[in-house]
Amino acid sequence: MFSVHQFLFCTTKPKEKETKIDEVTIVKTKKAVEQKADRTIFDFSEQAHLNSGTVMDGVKKLPGLVVTDIAGMMYQGKLLDVYMDGRPLNITSNELNSFLEGMPANAVERIEIITQPGAEFPATSGGAILNIITSKTARNYLTATYSGNYSFTSYDKFRQRTNNSLSLNSRNKVFAWQLNIGQNYREGMMKGTIDDLSGTFTNFYRRGYFAKAGMTFELGNDRLLLNYDVYHNNNDSYTLSHGKYNGNTFQSSDLANSLNLRNEAVATYQKRFDDKNKKLDFKLSYTSANSDFDQQNFNINQNVLQNDSDLNNVTFKVDYSQPVKILVEGKISFGGLYEKQNFQTSSKGIQNLDYQRQTASSYAEIQAKLKQFDFTLGTRAEDYDISGYAGNTALTPLKKFKLFPNASVQYNFMKQVYFALNYNKKINLPSISALNPNNTTYQNPNSVSTGNPNLQPTIFDNYEAKISAFDYAFIGYSVSHAKNQLAQMVTRNGDIITNIQMNIPEMNIRNFNVGLPIPFMIFTKPLSEIMKFNFNPDKINFLYIYAANQKHVIPNLDTKSFWMFNLMSQLILPKDIKLTANYFYIQPNASYFYFVSEKPIGNSVDLTLSKKFMKDRLSVSVFANDIFNGQQMAFRSVETPNVRLSNKNDSRSFGFSLNYKIPTKNKLAKEAPNMLNQEKKDDSGGILPQGNNQ
């Protein structure tokens, strides 16, 4: 867990896992959280309170991350682009939640939130990137890990949720391989209201399956990596709705079904040189995603919605880096990317969207070090060619060439203590779901939801200053200036509620955040005694405090900032049982683009009891999420007349999870690198390797 003693003192080192090889001890540290200059890394593999449910359950518990129906997924005020193992998901927003809920969190190794994407990341990453790392390491012998989870909710009736996954990996003299398979089943409910017009009650049943396979071939010093992933979701929802329309009351009963199939294939060739810091990578990837959505109304016994979509995406990427003599030391990186994407949708067999995008880009970035200073300077050039049709209406074409610079400077005060300044310019292209006329997941007489083919891309100028100490303590302030920010707008005309996406010509998002770990021993022991104490962070009691203030500034609109709080505490009970408590709260009456929250967001308390058995091979945890049943979303639009939207799902749940690693007696086995390929910056943090963070 949190290495709190490193925050307070740098006189001791954490106790680490040991593997004996002929009287030699190999020491390796895995940190729960790492603060780097351009990203924050959260370890999922060893934290029971994060990996006991789905990926979405774990993501919602990360300090500083907010998930709402209005603003989407944001971290420290920045909209997140979601990646998997270093590759963008290219998934529509309507399907993202189902995708993340269909994958067990215990299949994830760690999650990186890249708050300052450098030049080598596509400029379309917008404000920040959430990168889900599922890759494991392979050994000279077969290893297998089973992970399982069971939970239930009990509101109007008993509902169950399960997920299971199995990870296999091994290697020999010729190649290494990995296979990760899993399933997820969720029953749930949601209540929703729209003004005084209508109310809905939905029972949903979500079934997800996935398989991720990887092979690595060693070709001398070079490597060839082959990856194939497949994801399948089959979701049903039964909705009862009531309301009024044109002075008449109505009741409706509907069944909705969605089928999603996603395939990804990636081939990566990694050219290596005698100088291990010199790298050349070639990556070719292909993604295919198909979606079918049907809504059947039982009152009239016919389909009111019958939508399908087909996405195909091809990417070819080249990255090169090598050390160079800049000031004291340095590194230069450059590369290029070509991407072609086609997306078509139809409604009841009639095509209503044909979207085509070609992107050609290149980048160059240099890093340098001088005494206590680290410098990064780069730029990315991107050329876009976007066209298509929404029905008979041509999409607003985009043929644009633009430069996106980035720069950072970091001053290292001492070991693991630094001050960093960052700047980058990014772009966020309108999502396909925002353009898509089929951007509808439920329809009744009061509700109209449409795509907007006239949306323009958003240009961001992102600024950030941060002081970080020993990975866990930090203070940061960031400002994102956005032109043509994409936002949701809800309006009312009589009994009709219209939901549409639109551009905000100009706005700023300001975010102040602070994280502070507090070991409880400071209340019982003198400072002189604590400084001599050589303790294991997994064996101490502590409280981690995260607080943030965020404001969305829109011209000619009176907006209010909001405070966000996340408290995480660890208590070591008798028999080495670990109790983890997590509390998340955002104050009400806060502004989110063109909406104001009427109730606290989050407002949840989660408890997890965990213990390891059988020489740490078996991990068991028991959990209770949202024990006070406080999670609820309630917003009102700022447009006149105000529209009030609210929903409540069965967020209070109870369950248990386990993780079992099959034992082996071979302690001399060699460990191979991760096979599910990632961006080469995953471990570097964007700043030159230093003694203070290696």
Image (tube, rainbow, N blue to C red):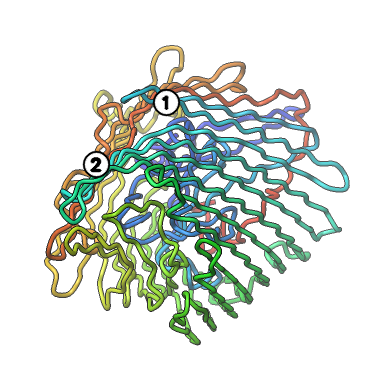
The residue located at (53%, 20%) in the rendering is 612
Q: Nearer the viewer, residue 109 or 371?
A: 109
Q: Which mark is residue 585?
A: 2
In this view, 613 is above or below 523: above
The residue located at (76%, 63%) in the rendering is 269
The residue located at (47%, 79%) in the rendering is 392
Q: Secondary structure at mark 2?
A: strand
User: Can residue 112 be seen here?
Assistant: yes
In this view, 204 is above or below 441: above
Q: Position of residue 669 (x, y in %)?
A: 78, 35
In this figure, which residue is indicated by the disc labeled 1? 159
Q: Quadrant of residue 423?
A: bottom left
Quadrant in which the N terminus is drawn: top left
Please tell me whether mark 2 or mark 1 is closer to you in this view: 1
Q: CA distance from mark 2 to mark 1?
A: 26 Å
In this view, 194 is above or below 163: below
**Label 2 vs 1, first from the N-terminus:** 1
How many badges with numbers are in the image?
2
Q: Position of residue 506 (x, y in %)?
A: 26, 77
Q: Position of residue 420 (x, y in %)?
A: 38, 64
Identity of the amino acid at label 2?
Tyr
